[in-house]
Image: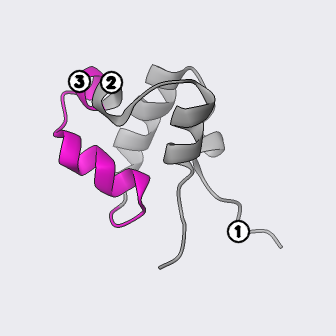
Amino acid sequence: MRKINRLKIVLVEQNKTGKWLAETLGKNEATVSRWCTNEAQPSLETLVKIANALKIDVKDLLVSTKR
């Protein structure tokens, strides 16, 4: 499976948990866990909400496609 988002890395960098993010966004913890493991991807709208909650640019949540 290709890694698309950097959510797990960003949460670790900010000393935040998936549980915190789930509560902040009003989402299920299992859903956030699937995003963190790249089993599923949040919608673009949700990515923006995540970026706002973490006070980062949305592009910092994505793995670059440039080689």
Q: Which residue is mark 3?
A: 23
Q: Which residue is mark 1?
A: 65
C-alpha span from label 3 to label 1? 30 Å
Q: Residues within 10 Å of mark 1 (few under 14, many from 20)?
A: few
Question: Of helix, strand and loop, which one carries label 3?
Answer: helix
In magenta stretch: residue 28 = yes
Question: For the point 54% across and 64% down, which residue is it?
Answer: 4
What colour scheme governs how the chains and residues are painted in the rendered image of this protein? one colour
Q: Which residue is mark 2?
A: 20
Mark 3 or mark 1, whichever is nearer to me? 3
Question: For the point 35% across and 36% down, which residue is it?
Answer: 18
* Residue type for callout 2: Trp
- In the rendered structure, the answer to whether residue 61 lies left or right of residue 25 reads right
Q: Quadrant of residue 50?
A: top left
Q: Earlier in the sequence, mark 3 or mark 1?
A: 3
- In the rendered structure, the answer to whether residue 9 lies left or right of residue 22 reads right
What span is colored magenta in the figure?
22-40
C-alpha span from label 2 to label 3? 5 Å
In magenta stretch: residue 14 = no
* Residue type for callout 3: Glu
* Residue type for callout 1: Thr
Judging depth in this view, the residue of 32 and 56 nearest the camera is 32
Q: Quadrant of residue 49?
A: top left
